[in-house]
Structure formats: C-alpha cells, structure tokens
Amino acid sequence: MPTKALTAVLLGNALMRIAGATGGVLIGLYLAALVAQGRTFDAGLVGALTAVAFGVELVGALPMGLLADARTPRTMMVFGALLGAAAVQLFGLSSFVAVFFLARAGEGLAVAATTPSVLAFLTEATATDAVRRGKVMSFFEMSLLGGLAFGGLLASLLWQSIGVWGFSAAAGLYVAAAGLFLSGAQGRGTATNPWEGLRGALAAPMLRRLAPAWICINAMVGVWLGSTLPFLLTLPERRGQFLTGIFADWPEGVGWALLGYAVIFGTGVTGWSFILHRFRRITVLRLALGGLFAACLGFYALNHAGGQPSGIRWLIGGGAALAIMVESGFTPTALALLAEAVGEQAGRGATMGVYSVLLGVGAVTGALLGGLGAQWAAMDGLIAATVLLALGATAGVEWLARHTPG
C-alpha cells in the first residue's frame, strides 16, 4: 500500500474528527451563551446531546460495517463524510432543541459509516507488516485526537469571529474529508459476503476479550470529549473549583486547552509508536492504566489548587502531563491487538463495526455519566466518573491477561 494513499485516508479521518469536534464544542459554547442570556439549559441536556450522537453511532456501526463489506470501505467513507456535512449544517439553521438532537444524530451516523470503514481499510493495508501496523494504528489514534483538539481550537476561533456560521465552516471540513477518502482509498477493498464476515467477527475470541476494557476506556471519551467539558469550562459560576468556569470570560481558551491536551497526548502516542512492538501488549495496557490513575489524581489536585501559587499549579499540571503521555498507549495497543485478531479473515468491516458498537456503548455510557457527574459536582464529578471507569478498565485488562497467551 503506497504511503500516499494511507496518508490521505488518515488525513481524511482527521478532518472528519476536526469537523465533528468543531460542531460539538460549538454546541457547548452556544448553549452556554444562551444560558447567559436567560435560557434554561443545563449540563444534563448537553450530556444528552453528546449521548445521542454516540447512541446513533452505536446503533449504526454494525450495519455500516456490513455495508462496508458489501460495498467496499471507500464508498462508506465518502458517504459518512457527506452525511456529516449535511448534519452539522442543519445544526446551524435553528435554535430549537429538537433540531439539535436531529443534527447530532446525523453526525453520529456519519461517524458510524466512517470509522469501521477506515479501520477495515487500514487493517487490510498493513496485513503483512506488524511493525507498520503498530505505527499506522498509532497515527490513526493521533489523527483522531489531533482532529478533536484542533476542532476545539477552531470552534473557539469560529465562535469568536463568526458565531453560529461556524457550523457552515465545519460542514466544509466534512466535504474536504470526503475528497481525501475518494482519492486515498481509490481501488482498494473487495466486496465480500457481509453475513459471513459478521459470523467471523462475532466468533473472534480477542474481540470478546477486549470488550470490557474497551467499553470502559471509550466511556471516558464520552465523559471528556463531548460537549459537557466546554460547557463546564465556560460556565458563569465557579462552584468553589479552579477549573469549573475557568474560561467563562475567555471562551476561546477552551480550544487552546484542548490543543494543549492533544499535543501532550500526541507526544505520548508518537513515542509509543516507535517502541510498541518491543513490549507485550498486556504490559503496555497496564502501564497506560497506571498513567490514567495518576492523571486523575493530578487533575483533582489542580482543580483544588486555586488558592495555591501559580508555580505549584504548573508543577501539578506538569505531573499530570507526564501521566497523560503514559496513558496514551492504551488505544493504539488495543487497536493493534484487534487488527492482529482479524488477520486475513473476510469481513473486516463487520469486525470493525462490532468494535465501533463497543466504542458507542462506552461513549454513550460516558456521556450520560459525565452529564450526571457534572450536575452533581462539576469538574470533580467528571474526575470521579473517570476513576470509576478506570477501575472497570483495570478489571477488564486483568481478565484479558488471564486469557491471552504469552
């Protein structure tokens, strides 16, 4: 597989995530602005909007994975990108809550169409090179996270400059992603019997063993990378916490914060991409979870360091950053395990559809849990939800270790 084609698909995936994150952060900023004007929106509604997007992704992932086997991954990538463009544009056309939910549902279906197809394409493209597969899956994770972070920054800048017209700019990014998918995935993928692929996917032992930990880890995506976090960071009240409402007077700061997180996480993923093949997969998963617990401790300390000197806060933040770099190895490692389990079997789209269903289950759970946590204790609630999910992921990894040879 030429590097140019792989690069185009990874860039297309990044643009998809930039567009999705731009829309998601714009929702949080828009609703926070409406609250300041007297509307009665709260964190529960914001969490529900995120849950709808993830919920539709959950329901649609498996059918879309089957269609990727029947119609080829390239077709579904392009379809998903164009659907996302239509959905995010719809959001910018109305201020009615019902339209918000409809638009988020459309974006969820767009991701459901794209993610299994992209992963099926990448799995096939790296089938004969384990080292390259580790790097490609790490770059996939970087395109995902980098897209989310740059989307947050872009959303903040768009909101500051053009307001709700930012949703139209996000639609343009979706269209650009469709163009990259169309050119990069050209000529790849052979249609297969989707039902045979589904049977093979459901019979894959590694997929079943990964499921518990994978659900818990992806629940954290719903907790932190939906609309709830921007809502809390720009909320016009502090609730006795340093991070809650920290950007109330500077909404664009949300984007810069997300970009900083992406740089830290991406640095960690880049490092893991060069050494991942030297470690047992289980060892990397355990190290990553250790980093996750340390990061939660760091965020909690930072959230209650408002009265401390700035030097102390920077010290706490630096420790949390190092922990984030360690935790960043979890997802590329899990993806590499899954790609190895798929191997040469037919129905890669179905397998990655099942993977996306698990992602959706986790993300919906996390979005709802994050919304409830935010209502209960603002930023402390998000941290508590993360610790709970990290405990579940740890139990899942230990169960996986007992059933994985070597």
Image (cartoon, rainbow, N blue to C red):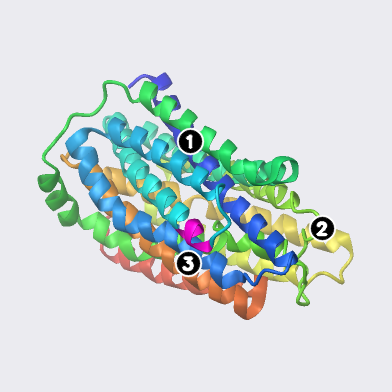
For the point 55% across and 47% down, the residue is 93
Inspect the magenta stretch and tell me whether residue 98 lies in it. Answer: yes
The one nearer the camera, 68 or 82, is: 82
Question: Is any atom of residue 183 visible in this view?
Answer: yes
The one nearer the camera, 279 or 355, is: 355
The dot on residue 366 is 3
Which quarter of the rendering shows the C terminus? bottom left
- Density class for disc 3 (Cα within 10 Å; few <14, some 14-19, many ≥20) is many
- Secondary structure mainly formed by the magenta segment: helix
For the point 62% across and 69% down, the residue is 41
Q: Amino acid at mark 1?
A: Tyr
Which quarter of the rendering shows the N terminus? top left
Left/right of residue 87 with respect to residue 123 in the rendered view: right
Inspect the magenta stretch and tell me whether residue 14 lies in it. Answer: no
Horizontal and vertical percent position of residue 49: 50, 62
The dot on residue 204 is none
The dot on residue 249 is 2
Question: Is any atom of residue 351 visible in this view?
Answer: no
The one nearer the camera, 120 or 165, is: 165
Q: Are marks 3 and 2 in contact (CB under 8 Å)?
A: no
